[in-house]
């Protein structure tokens, strides 16, 4: 998402990678280089645990902006930007803050017409990128009886009380846009769900994820159930049944786009002095 945004701004971004970056599904090619040269005006490093030596080496090439970095190198960078909360540094809890949504999410939203999308599904359930049948079964067991749901698990999409043909051709993030509520572990999906007007409920794989969820309370209206598998499925089921009473308003795609652009604009404003 940041690459595409900077490219539109005429910044000619380049991704530094040990191997060529493949084109996306639309055929878009990305500029890439195997090594960092002296020709760049700015280095943006999006890794969590930098060392002072790593940042010092990068600064010999250009000014360095670190993103979501909680390592020792953070204090050596020219600028540190936190998009997601962490357990080390204080997190901005303003209504407007820099944020970059996922590339596939952003690209698909931009392709939609500026119209309203109705909330016709009770729950979107993100069960993780790695398919775990036990975890998926637990989450389905927590759903209220008769509730409709889209299950996202291991890159696949299945329905609960929904005919599979309804899901055919439904690309992410349409399940979020059509769902009243989202159940997910802590991560960018919760931010995307909030943007899509979902009620947010979190089930986390580790205490660390659960603690991050608590740290995000200032910017995410999320109810954290705790850490799987130490959870009471019946209590969750009762709470989720209460959630079905609201969230019927349609989503305005135009406003979703505006919010996406605002987060990127705020990020750009931070790095603009270095470009």
Image: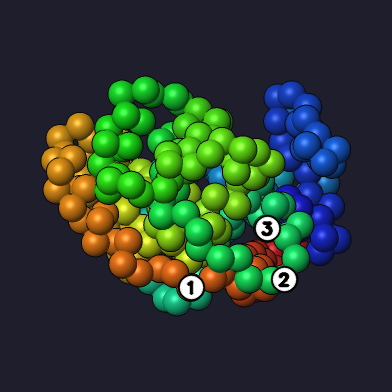
Residue linked to disc 1: 249
Labels 3 and 1 touching (C-beta < 8 A): no
- How packed mark 2 is, by other alpha carbons closer than 10 Å (few <14, some 14-19, many 20 or more), is some
Picture coordinates of residue 52 (x, y %)? 47, 41
- Mark 2 → mark 1, Cα distance in angstroms: 16 Å
Q: Secondary structure at mark 1?
A: loop
Q: Residue at x 56, y 36 (%)?
A: 164
- How packed mark 3 is, by other alpha carbons closer than 10 Å (few <14, some 14-19, many 20 or more), is many
> Residue 136: in sight, yes or no?
yes
- Mark 3 → mark 1, Cα distance in angstroms: 18 Å
Quadrant in the rendering for residue 78: bottom right
Picture coordinates of residue 244 (x, y %)? 32, 61
- Mark 3 → mark 2, Cα distance in angstroms: 10 Å
Picture coordinates of residue 197 (x, y %)? 48, 66
Q: Is residue 125 above or below residue 7?
A: above
Residue linked to disc 3: 109
Relative side of 233 to 98, left or right: left
Relative side of 38 to 88, left or right: right
Q: Secondary structure at mark 3?
A: helix
Residue linked to disc 2: 114
Labels 3 and 2 touching (C-beta < 8 A): no
Q: Secondary structure at mark 2?
A: loop
N-terminal label among 2 and 1: 2
Of residues 207 and 257, the one drawn nearer to the viewer in this rendering: 257
> Residue 206: in sight, yes or no?
no
Task: Give the label, 3 or 2, closer to the camera.
Answer: 2
N-terminal label among 3 and 2: 3
């Amino acid at each position: 998402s940041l690459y595409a945004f900077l490219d539109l701004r005429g910044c000619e971004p380049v991704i530094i990678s040990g191997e060529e970056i493949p084109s996306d599904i639309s055929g878009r090619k990305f500029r890439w280089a195997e090594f960092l040269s002296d020709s760049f005006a700015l280095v943006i490093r999006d890794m969590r645990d930098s060392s002072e030596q790593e940042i010092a080496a990068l600064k010999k090439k250009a000014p360095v902006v670190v993103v979501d970095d909680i390592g020792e190198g953070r204090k050596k960078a020219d600028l540190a930007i936190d998009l997601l909360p962490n357990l080390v540094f204080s997190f901005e809890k303003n209504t407007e803050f820099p944020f970059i949504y996922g590339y596939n999410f952003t690209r698909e939203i931009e392709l939609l017409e500026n119209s309203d999308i109705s909330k016709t599904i009770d729950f979107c359930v993100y069960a993780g990128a790695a398919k775990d049948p036990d975890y998926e079964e637990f989450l389905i067991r927590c759903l209220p009886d008769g509730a409709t749901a889209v299950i996202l698990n291991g890159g696949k999409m299945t329905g609960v009380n929904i005919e599979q043909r309804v899901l055919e051709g439904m690309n992410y993030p349409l399940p979020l846009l059509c769902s009243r509520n989202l159940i997910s572990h802590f991560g960018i999906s919760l931010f995307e769900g909030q943007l899509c007007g979902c009620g947010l409920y979190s089930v986390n794989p580790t205490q660390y994820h659960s603690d991050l969820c608590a740290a995000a309370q200032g910017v995410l209206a999320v109810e954290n159930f705790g850490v799987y598998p130490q959870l009471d499925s019946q209590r969750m089921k009762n709470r989720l049944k209460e959630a079905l009473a609201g969230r019927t308003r349609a989503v305005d795609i135009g406003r979703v786009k505006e919010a996406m652009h605002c987060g990127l604009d705020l990020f750009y404003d931070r790095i603009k002095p270095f470009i």
